[in-house]
Amino acid sequence: MLWRHRRILAASLLAAALLAAGCGTTTTTTKPSVTHTVTTEEYAMSPGTLVIKPGDTVTWTNVGYMDHDITSGVDPAPDGGWASPTFAPGESWSRTFDTPGTYDYFCSLHPYLMPGRIIVEP
């Protein structure tokens, strides 16, 4: 009978220790996504290179006086990854980047003049 009480006591102490240590519980922390802005003006992207985290969104805003677009690839060769419609002065276009990597892009309306790069860090 004494062994039974010892076993129950040992199991109770183990359970209390595990609860105190946080074992058996799961805590999930989710980083909120962040929106970054790149401006397109005349013949430049600003900033030209942007470093972000997975899940972040980049918004390109046309602050110049000419139409622009955003096309993935190395100028002047689109890689077919993604492309925005043409956006006029005062308009914007956004894309969320979920996968770490380096993403080159450019304005296909102004070849050789407006390259940019997004680096998504792990």
Image (cartoon, grey):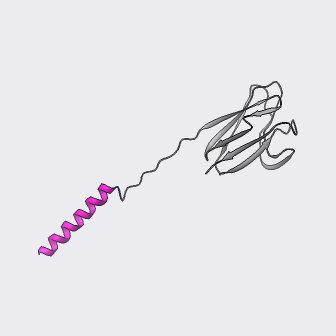
Q: Residue at x 75, y 37 (%)?
A: 48
Q: Residue at x 62, y 36 (%)?
A: 35
Above or below, 90 relative to 96? above
Location of residue 70 in the rendering, given as x and y in whole percent from the top left corner: 78, 39
3 with respect to 53 (left or right)? left
Task: Judge left or right: residue 47 versus residue 20.
Answer: right
**Which residue: 61% across, 45% down?**
53
- The magenta span reads 1-23
Which residue is rendered at x = 18% and y = 66% of the image?
A: 9
Nearer the observer, 91 or 58: 58
Q: Position of residue 51 (x, y in %)?
A: 66, 42
Residue, far left: 1
Q: Quadrant of residue 55?
A: top right
- Relative image position of residue 16 (x, y in whole percent): 26, 59
Q: Is residue 28 above or below residue 23?
A: above
Residue 14: % across, % down: 26, 64
- Whether residue 6 appears in magenta in the rendering, the answer is yes
Question: Looking at the image, which is closer to me, 2 or 115?
Answer: 115
Q: Which quarter of the figure has residue 47?
A: top right
